[in-house]
Amino acid sequence: MLHALPAQTSRSRTANLMPVMAGLLVLLAGTGCRPLSQHPLVKEAVEEVRGNARVAESLGTPVTCGTAVRGTANETDGIASLQFDVSGSKGKGAIAVEGKKTKGEWGVTMLELRPATGEKVSLTADLESRMGTDTPKFDPTAKPATSSSPPPPPTDVEIVLPPGPPGQ
């Protein structure tokens, strides 16, 4: 014989399960997420900025990088655009880093110091010379590559059509 549970007991069980379900939801939502400050592009940018003579000249020493990172990093599309604050004894600014993920590896396509006062300073070439890498850059204004000589024409082309009018 089946007995129905009193409504209060059923509600108290549901109330007891709510925190557990909420905890599982938070755990599942957070799986695979990491703070942007731990992104490989940020780590590479911080390393370059701390040791870059032009950054030290512009902002003064010691150079301190902020831990709050703004921007987006899309692991699926492999495109990231991030910024963080930087300061030194002479001033403050922001670092902008952009990158592309190719074959599972992130590469910096743009690294720039944006001082609060003064002109932007591109650090991309400095990073490339230190790291020995050159991430290909997309230039929408570049002309398509053309070969110096056109390909030779085909020697003979023969087109054979079936006899009769079309469609028969």
Image (cartoon, rainbow, N blue to C red):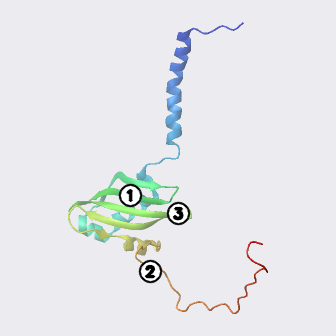
Q: Position of residue 144 (x, y in %)?
A: 48, 80
Side of 81 where 4 appears, left or right: right
Q: Earlier in the sequence, mark 2 or mark 1?
A: 1
Q: How many residues crowd around disc 1 within 10 Å: few (fewer than 14), some, or many (20 or more)?
A: many
Question: Is 131 rendered above or below residue 88?
Answer: below
Q: Position of residue 41 (x, y in %)?
A: 43, 60
Q: How many residues crowd around disc 3 within 10 Å: few (fewer than 14), some, or many (20 or more)?
A: few
Disc 3, SS: strand
Q: How many residues crowd around disc 2 within 10 Å: few (fewer than 14), some, or many (20 or more)?
A: few
Q: Earlier in the sequence, mark 1 or mark 3?
A: 1
Q: Quadrant of residue 17?
A: top right
| Residue to which mark 1 is pinned | 82
Residue type at numbered disc 2: Lys
Q: Position of residue 151 (x, y in %)?
A: 60, 89
Q: Residue at x 49, y 47 (%)?
A: 33
Residue 143, numbered label: 2
Q: Position of residue 105 (x, y in %)?
A: 53, 63
Q: Quadrant of residue 91?
A: bottom left
Residue type at numbered disc 3: Glu
Estimate the spatial distance between the alpha carbons at disc 2 and disc 3, rounded to whole Å. Answer: 28 Å
Estimate the spatial distance between the alpha carbons at disc 1 and disc 3, rounded to whole Å. Answer: 17 Å
Q: Earlier in the sequence, mark 2 or mark 3?
A: 3
Residue closest to the eye, 54 or 16: 16
Q: Are marks 2 and 1 in contact (CB under 8 Å)?
A: no
Question: Is 76 rendered above or below residue 165?
Answer: above
Estimate the spatial distance between the alpha carbons at disc 2 and disc 1, rounded to whole Å. Answer: 29 Å
Q: Residue at x 35, y 61 (%)?
A: 96
| Residue to which mark 3 is pinned | 105
Disc 2, SS: loop
